[in-house]
Amino acid sequence: QVQLVESGGGLVQPGGSLRLSCAASGSISSISSMGWYRQAPGKQRELVASITSRPRTNYADSVKGRFTISRDNAKNTVALQMNSLRPEDTAVYYCRVFLYSGTSYWGQGTQVTVSS
């Protein structure tokens, strides 16, 4: 079992920045990759960024050059630095971790609203 606690969401103006953080506890030694997903109203949940244990990163085209995912294995955290935010980035953002067994766990979600 892995428990995830997210923080850092909020309201920001277009062009602003936010940093999301996700802290993992539980069966931490079995975590392989970690990622951030988002779901906007009326839309499907989509991958924003992911990072493996190597680490190797992957980004959705819509956030490349603006968002940066990072991972601190010592603290068991994964962060998403979001810069140059746009109204279309408004969504609930979810942390997800994958175990080497193939099982995955989701965080509770944190709201990000980009609006003037």
Image: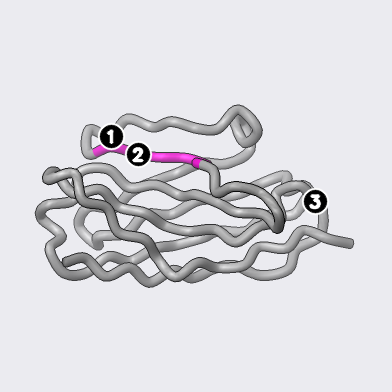
Q: Which mark is residue 51?
A: 2
Residue 50 sits inside the magenta stretch: yes
Disc 2 marks which amino acid? Answer: Ile
Query: SS at mark 1?
Result: loop
Q: Read off the residue under disc 3.
A: 87
| CB atoms of marks 3 and 1 within 8 Å | no
Query: SS at mark 2?
Result: strand
Residues in magenta, as a range:
47-52
| CB atoms of marks 1 and 2 within 8 Å | yes
Q: How many marks?
A: 3
Question: Looking at the image, which residue is at 56% across and 52% down?
Answer: 38
Disc 1 marks which amino acid? Answer: Pro
Q: Read off the residue under disc 1.
A: 55
Is 84 left or right of 65, judged from the image as shown?
right
Residue 60: horizontal and vertical position, in percent?
55, 32
The quadrant of the picture occupied by the C terminus is: bottom right
Foreground mark, 1 or 2, reads 2
Residue 7: horizontal and vertical position, in percent?
49, 70
